[in-house]
Image (cartoon, grey):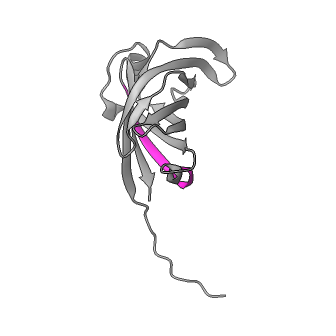
Amino acid sequence: MTTADHSLVVPALRLVSTVRVQVAEPMELGEGPDGRRRIVPILSGAATGELEGVVLPGGADFQVLRPDGVTELEARYAIETSDGTRIEIVNRGIRAGDPEDIAKLMAGQPVDPDRIYFRSVPALRAPAGEWEWVNRTLFVGRGIRRPDAVELTVFAVE
């Protein structure tokens, strides 16, 4: 048996979009076996960059605030691109920080984004046509939670 010399190849990231989503007050669902559950309605928003358009109303971010201070996130929403294509987004991620910073976020206060770990894996789905390439591309994101909005910078893994 021979072994081939494989070089470590680090994937490149390509900036695809910055999405700013306006959110409503969270709807509390109470404690579950894995933490406090809540739903944050998505009201509207805008995407800029290669993927440009508007965030359609009707989406939501389903959250579990775990006892260890980590928040598990699953946001589902749609963007209508500037050419009229509707792209579905299912964005799963985690947000973590020290207890004081997380308490400020939960109280709707601003926190320096560099103090919060907020990363995600958005999955994009589009119909056949110009945007079909998103169906076969892996994306990663970095989020920032503002008092009334969420900003997500989305990168394609090359």
Quadrant of residue 11 within the rendered picture: bottom left
Residue 79 location (% of width, % of height): 47, 34
Residue 118 location (% of width, % of height): 43, 35
Quadrant of residue 10 within the rendered picture: bottom left
Residue 29 location (% of width, % of height): 62, 13
**48 vs 11, nearest the viewer:** 48
Residue visible at 52% across and 29% down in the picture: 70
Residue visible at 32% across and 20% down in the picture: 110
Quadrant placement of the C terminus: bottom left
Asked if residue 29 lies left or right of residue 99, the reply is: right
Please, what is the dominant secondary structure of the magenta stretch? Answer: strand
Quadrant placement of the N terminus: bottom right
Please determine whether, in this image, residue 18 is positioned above or below residue 62: below
**61 part of magenta stretch:** no
Please determine whether, in this image, residue 143 is positioned above or below residue 27: below
Quadrant of residue 148 within the rendered picture: top left
